[in-house]
Image: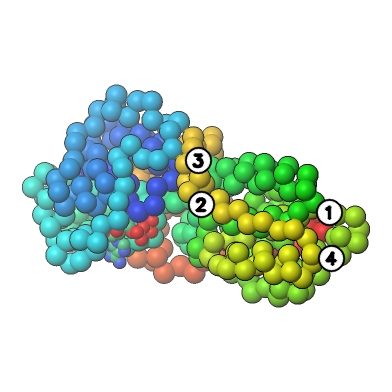
Amino acid sequence: MCAKKIAVLTSGGDAPGMNAAVRAVVRTAISFGMEVYGVKRGYNGLLNGDVERMYLRSVSNIIQHGGTALFTARSPEFNTPEGVERAAAHCREMGIDGVVVIGGDGSFRGARDLTNAGIPCIGVPGTIDNDISSSEYTIGYDTAMNTAMDMIDRIRDTTESHDRCSVVEVMGRRCGDIALNTGIATGAIAVLVPEVQFDFEKDLLDRIRYAQKTGKRHFIVVVAEGVGHTQEICDRIQKETGIESRVTILGHVQRGGSPTLRDRVVASQMGYHAVELLRDGKSNRVVVMKGERIVDYDITEALEMPRIFDERLYQIAHDLSR
Ligand code: ADP
């Protein structure tokens, strides 16, 4: 059945570009003659009835802002069979016959459950970590990487002035993509990611010592959050090389800020595609990027896809950092 009255929500971790996706969903729905509603604070809004009608002007002036104008939340209550049932019952009471969920894998599991409870859902990948295996790109990833790159460039200025080593932790619990890309872009001597086991002596200390012999006097090491032990890594570098070393944990600064052009455009394309799917009577689909094209997969299948780490890019990082 083609959806006529749809809702949009943002759920889980926020990401710059989510607003562009919300805007695209609202304006596409209106273009297609649908009624559209904004749900506040993720699945909590469906449980509490915190839902409001959206119009063309409701999404004015948000495309350039980070965060999410609909707010976001983690909803333990929704993550129960009773919670999903209650949210579905609220949707039925309001006449909502389609929901676009912008979030990560956890939010997509919720979307799958809500679809099974009778409310057609479409997922749109929004997370800075790029950790959704079915999609080559997630909304917020480009902005987060550019923020991290800019911060590391700044750290490098002071690191160079003092002939130090800076060990910089970037976000990415299960996924080292931010670390790998920013490591290449900032000329890091080493990049540590959760996908690759590293040998401290060979992959870190030997590289620093060799570079020292060739005249290098300051060093950047980029560590993905998921590797852990960033302070210990830093202490050991200082102890074993004698180079004064400092840790910087970039943290939540990477989540904020105005989205890049790429995040705004991809979010707009994905939001548009999501509403097309609901218009065409599709459900339980996730919108993804594959080879620079926007396509969609079944959510259940998408959740089971294995994540592919870019080994070649890792090799390039390794060979260029000397
Ligand atoms: P993300 O979407 O960024 O991965 P979370 O994993 O925190 O973030 O999930 C966001 C919300 O999605 C959770 O608070 C919960 O309400 C819902 N959710 C997560 N996992 C499930 C699940 N297995 N079944 C149903 N709902 C889920």
Quickly name the residue at label 4: 209
The answer to whether residue 269 is left or right of residue 232 is left
Q: Secondary structure at mark 1?
A: loop
* Mark positioned earlier in the residue sequence (4 or 2): 4
Residue that numbered label 2 is attached to = 251
Give the labeled residue for mark 1: 217
Sequence-wise, which precedes: disc 2 or disc 3?
2
Distance from label 3 to label 1 (Cα)? 36 Å
Amino acid type, callout 4: Arg
The colour scheme used to paint the residues is rainbow
Mark 2, other Cα within 10 Å: few <14 / some 14–19 / many ≥20: few
Q: CA distance from mark 2 to mark 3?
A: 20 Å
In the shown orientation, is residue 281 left or right of residue 193?
left
Measure the alpha-carbon separation of dots 3 and 4. Answer: 39 Å
Residue count near mark 4 (Cα–Cα under 10 Å), binned few <14, some 14–19, many ≥20:
few
- Tell me the CA gap for discs 4 and 1: 10 Å
Image side of residue 74 versus residue 258, left or right: left
- Residue pointed to by mark 3: 263
Q: Quadrant of the C terminus?
A: bottom right
Look at the image and tell me whether residue 263 can be seen: yes
Percent across and percent down for residue 309 are: 59, 65
Asked whether mark 4 lies closer than 8 Å to ligand 1, one says: no
Give the amino acid type for the residue marked by disc 2 in the picture.
Gly
At which x and y percent is residue 127? Answer: 44, 51
User: Where on the picture, by quarter, is residue 237?
Assistant: bottom right
Q: Is residue 281 visible?
A: no
The residue closer to the viewer here, 168 or 114, is 168
Indicate the position of residue 54 as horizontal and vertical percent values.
24, 32
Q: Nearer the viewer, residue 73 or 283?
A: 73
Of labels 3 and 4, earlier in sequence is: 4
Viewer-proximal residue among 238 and 72: 238
Above or below residue 319? Residue 258 is above
